[in-house]
Image (spheres, rainbow, N blue to C red):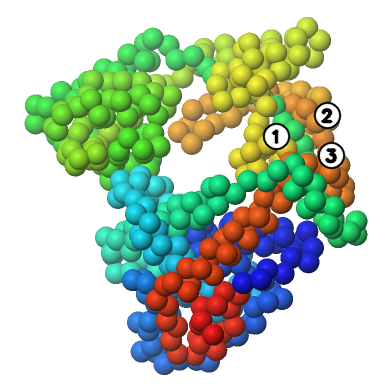
Amino acid sequence: MPLKMRSMKSIIKNACLIFGFAAFFNAVNAQEIIQNDTVKKVVPKPVSQKQKIDGVIGVVGDYVILDSDIDIAYIEIANQGNPIKDITRCQLLGKLLEDKLYAHQAVQDSIVVTDAEINSMMQERIDAFVERAGSMEKLLKIYNRPNEEEFRTYFFDILKMGKLTSEMRNKIIENVEITPEEVRTFFRKFPKEELPQIGAEVEVSQIVINPEVTKEERQKVIDKLNEFRNDVMAGNGSFFSKAVLYSKDEGTKSNGGFMRVNRKTNLVKEFKERAFSLEEGQISEPFQTEYGWHIILVEKIRGQDVDLRHILLIPKISEEAMQEAKDKIIGIRNKIVNGEISFADAARNSSDEKETRANGGVLINPQTLDPRFDLTKMDPSLYVQISDLNEGQVSQPMVDEDRLGRKTFKLITVTKRYDAHTADYAQDYLKIKDLALKEKQIKAISKWTDEKIKETYIKINGEYRDCVFVNNWLKK
């Protein structure tokens, strides 16, 4: 399939589409490239209600696509606040076909995705969906599911296929690399008038001071967890009910603290070490992680997977501790403003945030993995904090609160501002390198897709055969 790359802007657009296209495709990672100039916007003629409910409109290997899958894709895109009026059913079918192709080939290549991996991410995703919909009842109505159990089963399958898709795509591009000479050649092939405008950006650093937990408050939490442990061991109440009533882990408390984990599950080291040190039916002693204090009950060991329940408690912070932290950060700010120490050195010496302390408090953009933040795309809460700061200016101490309700004090500074400008090779090398790499990855994915379409059983039914796709799904 030849790719029509006529400008850097089209590469940017296609990179955005292929590496992230609304929430639904983030979940299932369907990846067909949508190019408005190459995909005819064909909307199939209306079909009967019977077909609409259960009609199989496509098959890729062992996977089927229902007409209702496209309806759900529209729901997901709309729920994310993205416009759907210019997205056709043919375009969505193209994405779903490629999604199934990835998943099918992942199975053929023996890529393993465990149930534990899916369970570990499912509750967080469902919680976000419920928050967006307003309630579980409304969510079930949107997805036309009779009860929560059926929705979880349905959503589990979507997440698992999405993980297979993601793993397969990563396998395709994992060895695609770009050399400095290729980056230079990529940049030089575009006329100056076609170079994109880079929006205003900032580099930001911060210093975080955590109020200290007193020994008394820490002991209260340990004693409470020991009380829960002893009650359960004595038969005075269930671990499930105590997790529902008392745990501060909002992601698992509604399910009695349940988690299925293995050694690859993305959990802090201390938690995994404790989980895999217990026998079935055993309850741990209270132990500490960066999130607070826990106890774990191991319910079942399934080979490499462990079914467990846990309770998280967080010690309270006293007013005295809050005042001490505030006084400390005010003192740090005064030293920086008076020129006694640089912001970076103060961060290295005093910040309690281990992720940024070593590099002088510099924040890394999670989307680009570099220090620059596009002002139009950065997190709104961060934008509010830095919008009025001049380069080199240090904010007043501010109180921040994480998702667990823990308060911290922090200072922020804008270490550098970049005005909006036309892309420049030297100044924007990392961005240009990323675009050049994306183009190369798109080509690798396209070549792989062409080859696998030829090797895989694919069928498209009904009026969807009238669609014009980017990929040769109809094998004409």
- The answer to whether 46 appears left or right of 334 in the picture is left
Mark closest to the chain's N terminus, 1 or 3: 1
Q: Which of marks 1 and 3 is in front?
A: 3
Left or right: 204 as drawn, with respect to 447: right
Badge 2: how crowded within 10 Å, few (<14), some, or many (20+)? some
Residue on which disc 1 sits:
371
Residue 474: x, y in percent?
A: 51, 82
Residue 20 place in picture, x, y as percent = 58, 57
Image coordinates of residue 263 in percent, x first then y, are 32, 35
Q: Does 127 appear above or below 28?
A: above
Q: Distance between the residues labelled 3 and 2?
A: 21 Å
Position of residue 234 relative to residue 67, above or below, is above
Please report the residue visible at 78 percent of the width from the left and 41 percent of the height from the top: 429
The residue that disc 3 covers is 426
Quadrant where the N terminus lies?
bottom right
* 3 vs 2, front mark: 3
Q: What element carries label 2?
A: loop
Quadrant for residue 412, please give it: top right
Q: Name the residue under label 2.
A: 391
Q: From this viewpoint, is residue 185 visible?
A: yes
Position of 34 relative to 28 (above/below): below
Which label number is shown at residue 161? Answer: none
